[in-house]
Image: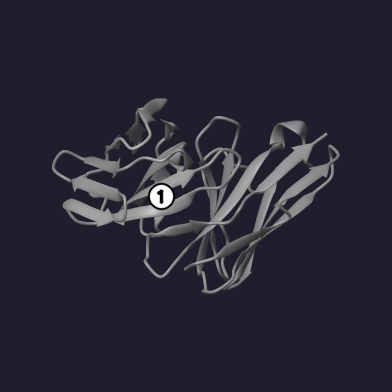
Amino acid sequence: GAVVSQHPSRVICKSGTSVKIECRSLDFQATTMFWYRQFPKQSLMLMATSNEGSKATYEQGVEKDKFLINHASLTLSTLTVTSAHPEDSSFYICSAHGTSRYEQYFGPGTRLTVT
Amino acid sequence: QKEVEQNSGPLSVPEGAIASLNCTYSDRVSQSFFWYRQYSGKSPELIMSIYSNGDKEDGRFTAQLNKASQYVSLLIRDSQPSDSATYLCAVNEGSQGNLIFGKGTKLSVKP
């Protein structure tokens, strides 16, 4: 099957620092990856679509200068939360297309806590 | 605004019963439909995909699609306590394959 990994699984950082989250497709090439955020007891919210070799497409209301996305290869996309604040504390999950165009396979998620 | 609607639940069924989860969507041109299972504190896991009208069975799971009614459902036969989770309905949007997710239905299977 299509396996997606994320690193780190948990991170605690201080307010004002930056955090980088990696998303890797392990057994397939992913030209498109997606970044989601999920607050407790709420549904998934798409933050941005990451395309290999081009700029990410951000959803309305998501600050592209705060959430930096880089998709430098067909197996790796990174999300950097810059100048993190406590309100950025959330569960960040990436996904990628598998062999079927629209099926998305999710990574295990990264729980970010900003103190 | 394209939407995917699900009953938030919780839906409680006894062990061994059939759990029926429902979803409606607003975009008539949607072609791909998915059910994800999400355990508390974990990321979603794809359990079913369906693209054509009718039923699609996979083990204890059956997905049903009715494009005319813009309705997709998931049946879980012989429900087990391990099926207790939130079930997310997702519908494709756009050429890049974005998915629109419902808010999920929380299922509780009682032993």
Q: Farthest left residue?
A: B68
* Quarter of the image where one finds residue B49: bottom left
Q: Amino acid at mark 1?
A: Leu
- Residue identified by numbered label 1: B99
Picture layout, residue B33 above or below residue B24: below
What residue sits 21% from the left and 47% below the top?
A: B65
Near mark 1 (Cα within 10 A), the count class, few <14, some 14-19 or many ≥20, is many
What residue sits 28% from the left and 42% below the top?
A: B75
What residue sits 35% from the left and 32% below the top?
A: B6
**Residue A64 location (% of width, % of height):** 63, 48
**Residue A101 location (% of width, % of height):** 37, 65
Could you tell me which chain the residue with mark 1 belongs to?
Answer: B
Question: In the depicted view, which residue is nearer to us: A45 or B64?
Answer: B64
**Residue B77 location (% of width, % of height):** 29, 43
Task: State left or right for residue A108 relative to residue B30.
Answer: right
Task: State left or right for residue A87 relative to residue B18.
Answer: right
Rendered image coloring scheme: one colour
Q: Quadrant of the C terminus of chain B?
A: top left
Question: In the depicted view, which residue is nearer to us: B79 or B30?
Answer: B79
Q: Secondary structure at mark 1?
A: strand
Task: State left or right for residue B43 relative to residue A90.
Answer: left
Q: Is residue B84 visible?
A: yes
Picture layout, residue B4 above or below residue B9: below
**Residue B58 location (% of width, % of height):** 30, 57
What residue sits 44% from the left and 66% below the top?
A: A98
